[in-house]
Amino acid sequence: APRNHMPDVTRRAPVPLRALAACLGLLPRGRMRVARLFSHYLARQEPLVAWFDDPPISFGINLNDLVCRYLFLEGNWEPTASATWKALAKPGYTVFDVGAHYGYFTLLAAQRALPAGKVVAFEPSTRIRTQLQANLALNGNPPVTVEPFAVAAGRGTALFDEMGLDDSGRAHIVGNRDAGADRKVSRIETVGLDEYRRDRDIARVDLMKMDIEGGEAAALEGMREGLAGGAYPRLLVEI
């Protein structure tokens, strides 16, 4: 496996944290498994700002968060998907990031599609969306449209499990029977993408990433008309 490229933040982080990141970076694989041995130490670190990719994107890092910890220690997120995403995103494209989370894929798209194109990030979690907007601000507030909707079969509401920091990447829509007292569940708005496009006169979405933790089938149902008409020519969907 290729060595990872550590983010520039390691040169600004406390010396012990820099040393740990450098040592883990020497491992050919299994970095996250080894990092679990240091989870209590990582959780005590102050939030950082890291720079990833080329050209670089700035990203807020809270090492309590599993996704941020992975980004910090690996220097990327889902490398195969992100490489494909970067190769497909072109100037002038209309790009939808469905399940944008903290905005890693959103920012990669913004670098490539804007200013001639359009980038829309869908993120229904209030807490996660706040960090997404903070990451956009760290990058000069590119003209990305941030939508608070969960993409589903159509317009309505749903219960949404925010999950915790250790599992923020798995926040998802839940049914009434799954909304136990031990979960942080909120009611959020949903939208179908065919409806969304019609309301905003968007004829075609040139590129879309969809990662919504089990909600993909419902979201694709809400895209039925556009799929039949070629309105979504390039989809990266987690199944």
Image (cartoon, grey):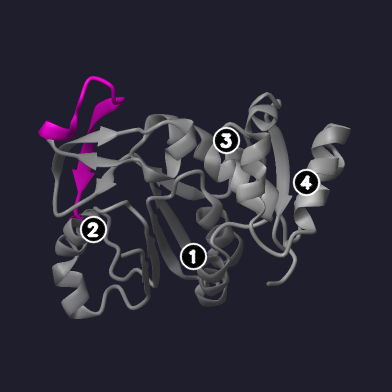
Whole-angstrom CA distance, mark 4 to mark 1, is: 37 Å
Q: Secondary structure at mark 2?
A: helix
Position in image of residue 41 (x %, y %): 70, 28
- Which of the marked residues, 3 or 1, is nearer the chain's N terminus? 1
Coordinates of residue 66 in the picture (x, y in percent): 54, 41
Q: Is residue 190 magenta?
A: yes
Q: Amino acid at mark 1?
A: Gly
Helix, strand or loop for disc 1: loop
Which one is closest to the eye, mark 4 or mark 3? 4
Mark sitting on residue 21: 4
Q: Which residues are magenta?
A: 176-195
| Residue underneath mark 3 | 134
- Label 4 SS: helix
Image: 179 above or below 61: above
The answer to whether residue 184 is magenta is: yes
Instruction: Find residue 117 and name its label.
Output: 1
Res 101 visible: yes
Q: CA distance from mark 2 to mark 4?
A: 41 Å
